[in-house]
């Protein structure tokens, strides 16, 4: 009897571990873009993907829910975006899940293959602005958007394996109970 109880406890523990491992927290991805013109000429255009951490927090300065931007890819003015640049023009790289804008007054800082450092931020609480440094200085107001990327749906084979696994665990637990009831 003690052996069957240990086996059942082991199966339950294995099932719990498998369920926890099968559903890790995932970072969110957002498609972003902005376009506009510099105050003194030149274009300010970008498209790409932002990746955020899976942990959300409340910004104590404004009470809005934020996630940290952990990755960026895309194109800015025809040059590949090579990475985040925290601190460029004071960028804090926070993505706002709530509030009127997806970045704040400190904004999103990034670099490009052309040697440009840029910062997309909110100015005067009412409009998006981009400042650049490096290969020429551009600054201007832009129209900016960020939309979530749809989450991936598991393949049918994944669902089949999940169902078979739970079935096997259930069968094993059921046969253990029958064996315990059988007269010795």
Image (cartoon, rainbow, N blue to C red):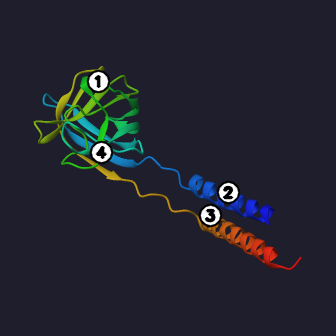
Q: Which dot, 2 or 1, sits closer to the camera?
A: 2
* CB contact under 8 Å: marks 4 and 1: no
At 62% across and 54% down in the image, what residue appears?
17
Q: Are marks 4 and 2 in contact (CB under 8 Å)?
A: no
Q: For mark 1, does the 10 Å Cα neighbourhood hold few (<14), some (14 to 19), or many (20 or more) residues?
A: many
Rounded to the nearest whole Å, what is the CA distance between mark 1 and mark 3? 43 Å
Residue 98, horizontal then vertical, whole percent: 24, 50
| Distance CA(mark 4)–CA(mark 1) | 19 Å
* Point 29% across, 45% down: residue: 33
Disc marking residue 158:
3
2 and 35: which one is in front? 2
Q: Which residue is mark 2?
A: 14
Mark 4 crowdedness (10 Å alpha carbons): few <14, some 14-19, many ≥20: some
* Residue ID at (42%, 45%): 54
Residue 173 on image: x %, y %: 72, 70
- Determine the secondary structure under disc 1: helix
CA gap between label 2 and label 1 equals 48 Å
Q: Mark 4 highlights which residue?
A: 33
* Mark sitting earlier along the chain (4/1): 4
The x and y percentages for residue 42 are: 21, 31
Q: Are marks 3 and 4 in contact (CB under 8 Å)?
A: no
Task: Kindly identify which residue carries mark 1.
Answer: 88
Q: Does the CB distance between marks 2 and 3 fall below 8 Å?
A: no
Residue 76: mark in rendering: none
Helix, strand or loop status at disc 4: strand
Residue, far right: 184
Q: Between disc 4 and disc 2, whose residue precedes?
A: 2
- Mark 2 or 3 closer to N-term? 2
- Give the alpha-carbon distance from disc 2 to disc 3, as whole Å: 18 Å
Real-space Cα distance between discs 4 and 2? 45 Å
Disc 2: CA contacts within 10 A as few (<14), some (14-19) or many (>=20) = few
């Amino acid at each position: 009897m003690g052996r069957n109880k240990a086996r059942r406890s082991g199966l339950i523990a294995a099932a719990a571990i498998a369920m926890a491992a099968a559903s890790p927290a995932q970072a969110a991805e957002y498609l972003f873009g902005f376009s506009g013109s510099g105050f003194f000429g030149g274009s300010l255009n970008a498209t790409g993907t932002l990746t955020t951490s899976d942990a959300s927090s409340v910004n104590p300065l404004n009470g809005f829910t934020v996630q940290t931007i952990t990755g960026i890819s895309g194109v800015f003015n025809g040059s590949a975006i090579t990475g985040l640049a925290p601190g460029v023009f004071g960028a804090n790289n926070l993505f706002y899940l709530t509030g009127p804008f997806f970045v704040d007054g400190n904004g999103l800082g990034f670099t490009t293959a052309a040697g440009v450092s840029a910062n997309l931020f909110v100015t005067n609480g009412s409009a998006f602005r981009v400042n650049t440094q490096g290969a020429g200085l551009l600054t201007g107001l832009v129209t900016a958007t960020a939309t979530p990327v749809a989450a991936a749906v598991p393949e049918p084979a994944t669902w089949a394996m999940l169902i078979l696994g739970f079935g096997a665990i259930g069968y094993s637990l059921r046969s253990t109970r029958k064996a315990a009831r059988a007269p010795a």
